[in-house]
């Protein structure tokens, strides 16, 4: 962990440059530090973007758009660490979409969900590759 999923209205597919955004957000997660140590292991970082083909935003105007990010993290990180992570990710999102935000209706949002390891199964050799 962490896993960050972006869900976005398909009308942003051509202009949103989601590949670049995913890279920026991954680097932001990797850069998070607490007490001089990485908050999130590199081998656990996942960032993905999924287009919502069917959607209605507000009154249904076709130029309205949205991007909603959900960050899933394992339990145990402090509220301060979670806030710093959320602030850093949301700043990347706002900067990335600044021009589109000025041109059209755009709703950006981010939430962080913490979960228990007892409800999670993993089979992953990526962590070993980064040790």
Image (tube, helix red, strand yellow):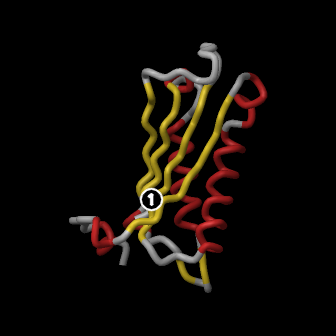
How far across and down, in percent of the image, does residue 2 sit? 44, 62
Horizontal side, residue 56 vs residue 102: left or right: left
> In front here: 107 or 102?
107
Q: Residue at x 64, y 39 (%)?
A: 108
In the picture, the quarter occupied by the C terminus is: bottom left
Crowding at dot 1, Cα within 10 Å, few <14 / some 14-19 / many 20+, comes out as: some
Q: Residue at x 60, y 14 (%)?
A: 62
* Residue that sits furthest to the right in the current view: 102
Q: Residue at x 61, y 44 (%)?
A: 109
Horizontal side, residue 83 vs residue 27: left or right: right
> In front here: 92 or 86?
86
In the picture, the quarter occupied by the N terminus is: bottom left
Horizontal side, residue 22 vs residue 46: left or right: right
Residue 78 falls in which quadrant of the image? Answer: bottom right
At mark 1, the secondary structure is strand
Q: Is residue 3 above or below residue 114?
A: above
* Residue that sits furthest to the bottom in the current view: 35
> In front here: 41 or 75?
75
Q: Residue at x 62, y 55 (%)?
A: 89
Q: How many discs mark residues in the rendered view?
A: 1
Q: Which residue is mark 1?
A: 72
Q: Is residue 113 above or below residue 108?
A: below
How far across and down, in percent of the image, does residue 74 sit? 42, 69
Q: Is residue 105 above or below residue 50?
A: above
How far across and down, in percent of the image, does residue 7 sit? 48, 38
* Residue that sits furthest to the front in the current view: 59
How far across and down, in percent of the image, does residue 40 sit? 48, 71
> In front here: 109 or 24?
109
């Amino acid at each position: 962990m962490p896993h960050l999923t972006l869900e976005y209205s398909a009308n942003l597919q051509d202009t949103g440059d989601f590949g670049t955004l995913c890279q920026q957000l991954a680097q932001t997660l990797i850069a998070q530090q607490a007490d001089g140590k990485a908050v999130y292991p590199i081998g656990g970082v996942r960032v993905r973007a999924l287009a919502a083909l069917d959607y209605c935003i507000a009154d249904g105007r076709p130029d309205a758009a949205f991007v909603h990010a959900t960050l899933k993290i394992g339990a145990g990180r402090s509220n301060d660490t979670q806030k710093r992570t959320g602030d850093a990710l949301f700043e990347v999102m706002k900067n990335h979409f600044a021009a589109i935000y000025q041109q059209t209706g755009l709703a950006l949002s981010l939430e962080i969900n913490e979960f228990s390891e007892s409800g999670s199964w993993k089979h992953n050799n990526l962590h070993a590759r980064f040790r």
